[in-house]
């Protein structure tokens, strides 16, 4: 969707996120770092981010868009289970995201502010 199309849909009441999909928020560097911190392994954040980026590069090489994090959600889920020992990890990425990732997008984080701004508009920034 172009910026013009996004503007047109917003003016008709449709909200358009600033990123391609919700996975782009859930798999953001800040969220991965917070997950590692939560599991007592902050030193693992850079490894998980690098693995996510490596998997994304492989997908891009086969024609995926470079911002389509939905394409690597399974690989990141498996890496988090392996590296962090997340238990219970859930039955798949969806359950894992609900249980472990979404709660990390909270007031006081930049990713929360970005998502809130996408949903409620620029007037929402700072109004928590």
Image (cartoon, rainbow, N blue to C red):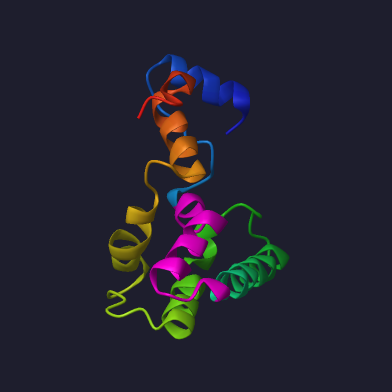
* Residue at position x 43%, y 49% in the image: 22
* Residue at position x 44%, y 26% in the image: 126
Residue reaching furthest to the top:
11
Query: Is 83 in front, or is 2?
Result: 83
Instruction: Residue 91: name its quadrant.
Output: bottom left
Q: In the rendered view, does 63 fall on the left or right side of 128?
A: right
Q: Is residue 30 part of the magenta span, yes or no?
A: yes
Q: Which quarter shows the N terminus?
A: top right
Is the stretch drawn in magenta largely helix, strand or loop?
helix
Residue 78: percent from the left, percent from the top? 45, 79
Up-down relation of residue 68 to residue 18 (above or below): below
* Residue at position x 45%, y 55% in the image: 26
Question: Where does the magenta region start and end?
Answer: 23-43
Count the marks: 0
Q: Which quarter shows the C terminus?
A: top left
Residue 84: percent from the left, percent from the top? 44, 80
Q: In the rendered view, does 48 fall on the left or right side of 100?
A: right
Residue 79: percent from the left, percent from the top? 50, 78
* Residue at position x 42%, y 75% in the image: 40
Residue 88: percent from the left, percent from the top? 27, 79
Q: In the rendered view, does 90 fall on the left or right side of 31?
A: left
Residue reaching furthest to the right:
61
Q: Is residue 70 part of the magenta span, yes or no?
A: no
């Amino acid at each position: 969707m172009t910026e013009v199309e996004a503007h047109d849909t917003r003016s008709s009441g449709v909200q358009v996120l600033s990123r391609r999909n919700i996975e782009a928020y859930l798999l953001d560097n800040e969220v991965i770092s917070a997950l590692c911190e939560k599991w007592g392994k902050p030193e693992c954040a850079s490894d998980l981010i690098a693995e996510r980026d490596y998997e994304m590069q492989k997908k891009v090489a086969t024609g995926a868009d470079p911002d389509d994090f939905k394409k690597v959600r399974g690989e990141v889920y498996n890496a988090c289970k392996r590296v962090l020992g997340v238990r219970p990890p859930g039955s798949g990425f969806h359950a894992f995201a609900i249980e472990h990732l979404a709660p990390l997008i909270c007031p006081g984080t930049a990713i929360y502010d970005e998502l809130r701004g996408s949903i409620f508009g620029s007037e929402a920034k700072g109004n928590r």
